[in-house]
Image (cartoon, grey):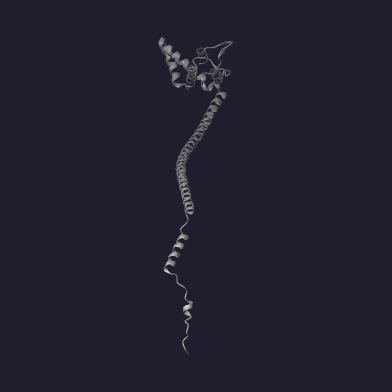
């Protein structure tokens, strides 16, 4: 078979650009990639706007962080104060509870003493009511009862003591001896002297005036402050009653 007179591959090859054509194509491609001046201005403005927004957001974030730190510090400070106040309240509450217990104990002790005193007074006055002269040295009229246990007895003993002193001063030896023997066997219970001192103190504290508090106390003791329609002085009240 004879060789073909035509080579078909030659017709199938593409035409390759010349060097000049290649340079032209590259320049056109570069021109397509490079943005125009207006496009650069727009991009620059967008970048600057984004940068400004970013800076503003960074400032806001920094401000918020500072506020958060301040609030945390204040919260910690207030929490410390709250703990301190809470501790003080616990101390105060414990003190109050302790004082309440002390008051309750004192009230209990006072009630016990009041009960004991009432029982003793009832016993003494019961004895006086059953036998009024049992508390005196000498028998007396029971229509004049004692204001307190042993009132008559203490008065009699004071009179005997004064009489003994006079007897000794006058040289009445026998009388003085007999009165001394009576005093040795009968000691006063001291209520008369105590009541006298209490009344003197009452008058002294009120500047020797018979005012409201004094009248109230005299009433409680069964002591009159008048002689008929005439008002008595404190010294007169003392003499008339003690």
Kindly identify the residue that appears in the image at 42 percent across and 67 percent down: 20
Q: Please tell me whether residue 100 is drawn above or below residue 140 in the rendered image.
A: below
> Is residue 151 among the parts visible in the rendering?
yes
Q: How many numbered marks appear?
A: 0
Task: Name which quarter of the figure residue 144 lies in.
Answer: top right
Q: Nearer the viewer, residue 182 or 69?
A: 69
> Is residue 146 among the parts visible in the rendering?
no
> Which residue is most to the front?
5
Q: Nearer the viewer, residue 225 or 191?
A: 225
Q: Nearer the viewer, residue 51 or 104?
A: 51
User: Residue 166: image x %, image y %?
Assistant: 43, 11
User: Residue 175: image x %, image y %?
Assistant: 44, 13
Q: Please tell me whether residue 215 is drawn above or below residue 102 in the rendered image.
A: above
User: Residue 56: image x %, image y %?
Assistant: 47, 46
Q: Please tell me whether residue 107 is drawn above or below residue 41 in the rendered image.
A: above
> Which residue is most to the bottom?
1
User: Residue 17: image x %, image y %?
Assistant: 45, 70
């Amino acid at each position: 078979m004879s060789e073909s007179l035509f080579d078909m591959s030659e017709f199938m090859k593409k035409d390759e650009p010349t060097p000049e054509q290649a340079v032209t194509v590259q320049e056109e491609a570069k021109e397509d990639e490079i943005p125009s001046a207006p496009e650069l201005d727009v991009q620059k403005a967008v970048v600057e706007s984004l940068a400004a927004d970013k800076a503003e957001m960074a400032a806001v974030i920094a401000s918020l962080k500072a506020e958060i730190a301040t609030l945390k510090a204040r919260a910690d400070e207030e929490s410390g104060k709250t703990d301190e106040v809470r501790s003080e309240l616990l101390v105060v509450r414990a003190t109050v509870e302790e004082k309440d217990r002390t008051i309750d104990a004192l009230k209990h002790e006072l009630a016990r003493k009041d009960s004991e005193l009432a029982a003793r007074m009832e016993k003494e006055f019961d004895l006086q009511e059953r036998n009024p002269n049992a508390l005196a040295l000498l028998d007396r009229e029971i229509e004049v009862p004692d204001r307190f246990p042993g009132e008559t007895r203490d008065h009699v003993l004071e009179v005997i003591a004064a009489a003994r002193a006079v007897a000794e001063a006058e040289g009445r030896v026998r009388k003085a001896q007999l009165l001394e023997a009576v005093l040795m066997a009968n000691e006063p219970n001291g209520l008369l002297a105590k009541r006298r001192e209490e009344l003197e103190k009452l008058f002294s504290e009120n500047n020797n005036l018979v005012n409201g508090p004094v009248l109230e106390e005299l009433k409680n003791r069964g002591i009159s402050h008048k002689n008929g329609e005439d008002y008595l002085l404190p010294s007169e009240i003392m003499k008339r009653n003690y």
